Image: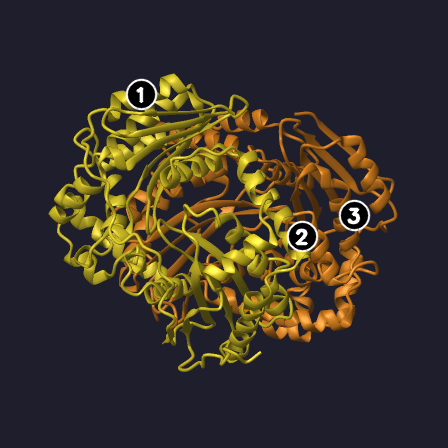
Chain colours: A orange, B yellow
């Protein structure tokens, strides 16, 4: 699957991986901006702007955007994270020119005041909807407490108050600062012609403004180490999140960190699975590794009946202490590698999977990696490299957040106990 | 992508679609049994049995099952619906013999009393977890009210009381009745050798018992037409579900019904999207078509702030009345077809997608359909065939369930009003 890359004169990056046996193509625009690029007076502006991008341009009303995508049967959407805003569409190859025309057009949105005020309701509804998803809400609070004054702790959605207070011109100036050409990568994967793709992007995006692509506060953080209980009587189960420091997206240790997280908290056959889920002590338990620009985090979470939370929390601490002290076993490492090999191969089977993978790799590292190179990098993970991760990023240095009906929960006394 | 099928002497069906360019393979066992095959004294037994299948056999403890899957890096799981219990694994091709060995072994589970009693906690935790997902909970109640005394209204999970009361021998006799060879289809899709696959299945499953594969109450139902409000103070948003009758899985009208549902309630560019989501009157709105053995249902749902629910409900009624009276437009039909074409192609891009598609088609219809045949069947949908769906299955004949903080909500007076 040949890879291609190109840079427009204004700095916009264009990359693509062609796969002639595919029957569809996935296109994406990766804008390197997220909630970490916000100041508190515009909390939630990145995500709100993502919505506004679909609300029309000088050439298209919101209705036109939707209808034009729908007419070509596009599976299209966007997402906003702490670091990225990504717009994408999966389509049949015959619709590539139309899809690029729509995507490139909407990325220069009009931000009309009427649409802006109307869309505030949608955003506030969305915030309400997530309130009904306690694990999501718990993670949002946990991030805030873990990252403390580091902007990675910013909430992605904002609050009803911050959204209501936001002005259209504030959004426009954020747009002009962050949606500059050098901060954007156009990506294609699947069945498409590279030269035609570059020509289309050149035509539609060649006039986009340049500008600096700085980012505030890119530094490593070990997390606050705090312990918080948020009482929410409306929630049935107790939701507990433990965050600890981890390598950043450009660290060579990221493959080892990912493998370690899988070994501890994959949804089957992991340490936490056997300790909590299999015996019915929790209804879910999970560990994952999040790599960001300049820093990272391990996140371990579980949910259970409130009366079970204290014991479960102690069990999780024991697991993390044990891993910190002894690492994982050879058998656990081999098992994790088999799982990751299978996951990498399966994740690469659709154009959409490849588009996301090469787009993220380019955004963070300006690097292209084949599926086989990814497999080799995971295969090189060793007990030693996992030991190195633990030494530099102690997994037992936890920041804890519990959300649910409980009024109190005690931090286990683990230091020096075992 | 060549298709193959074979029937073992005991009646077990074996099917496969080989795709040499794939890098992985998906295997599945489709057991034609679900909550509709339960009597009220064993409510939840099908789903509980699905869990027990992973708890071990004479050859394997629960730990062995998990470890053996994990050792080969399998992405494996199972799900239980009203009509089917499906066990599956996606793996790299070199692990096919091990994967079949595990899957075939666990499908003859020991159902040990200790494991059985322990697993009750997990099931009860799972019921609690879904309680925290109001739309899921609303759908469970809506089904019960729509289907009334038809067994498709049975809850899949059961209740904490029904699970606590269930005995191991009751589960065992359900297993012996429903997990008979002729009620099971073994399926493979992706990169594999058909002859070797059949030989493995023959060896591992050839001795499984035969038995009748009857199913109670296979008849068409128009739904009760009732209107219910379930007050749940813990829930923030109001969740409303409207169900109406629809064609069954073996009806030739199913393609038209699916297209109609997409046109009314797809998550972008549909009637409900423009009426509710785009203007911010609801945070979600959706229509879908569910085809079952002997009957079917349309399900329209939305969630919104409680104060908005009455108006939203009236808007949904207007949409359904209008569609019932006038059908959809030519432009809506063309748009729906583009979306479905793209969805069918993209859904076929992974072995897991094809495995599920051919397994379901075989379970319901003993029929294999290529991706192109599916595309043609959708392409043949016309305004006339959609009119036929509406005449036989009035979409405005709704059964309504609201779940959320509201204490009252009024059924709109729509009949003969417009």
Residue name at image x 71 percent, y 59 percent? A54
Residue name at image x 35 percent, y 71 percent? A407
The quarter of the picture where residue A227 lies is bottom left
The label number, if any, that marks residue A70 in the structure image:
2
From the viewer's perspective, is A284 left or right of A46?
left
- In the image, A407 versus B87, the foreground residue is B87
Residue name at image x 65 percent, y 28 percent? A19
- In the image, A290 versus A149, the foreground residue is A290
| Position of A335 relative to B338 (above/below) | above
The quarter of the picture where residue A157 lies is bottom right
The label number, if any, that marks residue B200 in the structure image:
1
The label number, if any, that marks residue A101 in the structure image:
3
Q: Position of residue B84 (x, y in %)?
A: 33, 45
Mark 1 to mark 3 CA distance (whole Å): 51 Å
The label number, if any, that marks residue A366 in the structure image:
none
Mark 1 to mark 2 CA distance (whole Å): 45 Å
Mark 2 to mark 3 CA distance (whole Å): 14 Å
Say which of marks 1 and 2 sits in front.
Answer: 2
Chain where mark 1 sits: B
Q: Is mark 1 on a helix, strand or loop?
A: helix
């Amino acid at each position: 699957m040949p890879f291609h890359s190109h840079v427009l004169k204004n700095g916009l990056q264009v990359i693509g991986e062609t796969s002639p046996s595919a029957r569809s193509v996935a296109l994406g625009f990766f804008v390197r901006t997220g909630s970490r690029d916000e100041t508190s007076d515009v909390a939630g502006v990145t995500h709100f702007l993502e919505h506004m991008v679909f609300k029309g341009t000088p050439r298209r009303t919101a209705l036109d955007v939707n209808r034009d995508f729908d007419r070509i049967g596009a599976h299209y959407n966007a997402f906003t994270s702490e670091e990225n805003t990504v717009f994408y569409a999966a389509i049949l190859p015959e619709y590539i020119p139309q899809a690029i025309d729509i995507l490139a057009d909407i990325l220069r949105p009009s931000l009309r005041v009427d649409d802006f005020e109307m869309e505030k309701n949608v955003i506030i509804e969305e915030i309400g909807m997530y309130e009904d998803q306690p694990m999501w809400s718990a993670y949002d609070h946990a991030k805030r407490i873990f990252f403390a004054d580091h902007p990675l702790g910013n909430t992605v959605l904002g609050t009803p108050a911050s959204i209501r207070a936001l002005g259209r011109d504030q959004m426009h100036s954020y747009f002009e600062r962050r949606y500059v050409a050098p901060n954007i990568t156009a990506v294609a994967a699947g069945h498409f012609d590279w030269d035609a793709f570059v020509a289309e992007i050149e035509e539609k995006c060649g006039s986009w403004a340049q500008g600096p692509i700085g980012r505030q506060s890119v530094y490593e953080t070990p997390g606050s180490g705090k312990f918080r209980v948020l009482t929410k009587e409306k929630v049935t189960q107790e939701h507990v999140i433990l965050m600890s420091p981890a390598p950043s997206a450009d660290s060579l240790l990221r493959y080892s960190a990912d493998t370690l997280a899988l070994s501890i908290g994959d949804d089957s056959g992991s340490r936490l699975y056997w300790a909590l889920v299999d015996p019915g002590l929790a209804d879910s338990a999970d560990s994952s590794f999040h790599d960001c620009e300049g820093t990272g985090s391990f996140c371990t979470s579980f949910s259970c009946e409130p009366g079970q939370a204290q014991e479960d929390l102690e069990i999780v601490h024991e697991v993390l202490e044990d891993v910190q002290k002894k690492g994982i076993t050879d058998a656990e490492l081999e098992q994790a590698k088999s799982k990751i090999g299978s996951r990498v191969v399966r994740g690469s089977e659709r154009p959409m999977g490849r588009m996301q993978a090469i787009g993220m790799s380019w955004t963070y590292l300006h690097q292209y990696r084949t599926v086989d190179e990814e497999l080799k990098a995971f295969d090189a993970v060793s007990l030693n490299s996992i030991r190195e991760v633990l030494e530099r990023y102690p997994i037992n240095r936890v920041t804890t957040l519990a959300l649910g009906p409980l009024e109190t929960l005690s931090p286990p006394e683990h230091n020096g106990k075992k």
